[in-house]
Image (cartoon, helix red, strand yellow):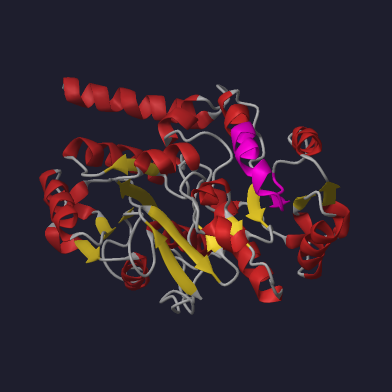
Amino acid sequence: ACVCDFGGVAPIMSAGYVAQAGGLSVAPLPRQRTPSPLRTLKQSAPAPARDFDISPPTTDVIYAEDEEVFRETAIRELLKIGCLRENVHEADNGLGALEHLARMQNEGNMSKPLLVLLDVRMPGMDGRECALQIQDLVKKKQLRREPFVVCISSINKVIEVDEKGGNFQIVLPKPVTTVHLEEVMDYMRNWWCLGMGRELPAWKEFELSHIDMIAADDEPVCRMAAYMAFVKSGVTQESVTEVDDFEELEERLEVLQEADAKRPLIILLGQEAWASNLRAWVLEATAAKKLRREPFVVCTSVDSDRIGASTAVENFHAFLPRTFQSNDVEWCLEYCRLWWLTRGHEPYQKAELAAAAMDPNDSEPEALSECSDLEDEEEDG
């Protein structure tokens, strides 16, 4: 597979062109996998009893950042809030963070929280994929010490707005400050003691049989060839709708907005001319807060090679080559899976704000209020 760089736009990968589009939200790029150090990790002993006395000196920290200057700055800020240097474990990518995470399952302050700080853009394994793998291990109950995962990135607004927080409990800008880190400690304390945290997208389901698909092209033969390739890969034919003009595509999109939002929605778009209008429709629906199901847009045009090398790349999430094969379709579906599992459904908000929006009869917000009152009393004392 060749990798091309389009000046500031994230790379396009062609094993059938899988793109990280500059104008559309991105996800971890499918790649040849390096075996995760946690792949064979099994919980050999129960999780240790929790100690609810949370403080920086007893907190183990894993920090993944590929730029040394930002890593040194963040570590200096961690030391200012009271963290101990020997408890801070550095890595230059997500894979290194996973290696530390595997080792820390049986080392360090076992009864205390484990804090993981991740940059997003890193070589080898980026922060998105690392956070996704961590949550996958949490789902499988393979971690004795479940980490509190925080994003520290210069593209924090992209993570917050386009990806709705992704698989991070908190999203912070770079460079991080002591104010930010003290905020992290407060939220981590509530997460550890009260179980308050964000609902992360990694816990969503992704099954090929639960995908809705729109095949949009004015050429019937091309339209059928495209969607049948996905049907052969596991998408059910009953979930595929064919449209032959943009007006019909708009109508079908509006109908599917009212369908099950837990099902991914894929558009196989064979007409380049419709792409900019489709993107405008998505942006308009988002601004009007009517977009319940954002579509994953795959370019199936016979000119996909040319489109992928042009500015129109920003209108698509993935590309299929003119003479695509089954492995190209599988790459597209894998990229869609990663995109789906790194995007939240609800707008990003931190755990405390999420708690405030809970049912007032729930005990968790009340407990939080009691804890705050106790802290105020201690300060007054």
Q: Is residue 217 left or right of residue 299?
A: right
Residue drawn at (21%, 59%) of the image: 67
Q: Residue at x 60, y 39 (%)?
A: 276
For this view, does 149 lie left or right of residue 355?
left
Q: Is residue 279 magenta?
A: yes
Residue 176 vertical placement versus 299 (above, below):
above
Q: Residue at x 50, y 67 (%)?
A: 13
**Residue 360 position (above or below residue 354):** above
Q: Is residue 169 left or right of residue 65?
A: right
Give the image location of residue 18, x and y in percent. Answer: 55, 63
Snapshot quadrant of residue 14: bottom right
Start and end of the magenta stretch? 262-282
**Looking at the image, is 292 positioned above or below residue 34?**
above
Report the front residue among 55 and 49.
55
**Quadrant placement of the C terminus:** top left
Q: Nearer the viewer, residue 3 or 124?
A: 3
Comparing 348 with 274, the one in front is 274
Instruction: Tell me where residue 49 appears, x and y as whole percent.
Output: 39, 57
Q: Is residue 306 magenta?
A: no
Q: Residue at x 19, y 61 (%)?
A: 87
Q: Position of residue 273 (x, y in %)?
A: 66, 43
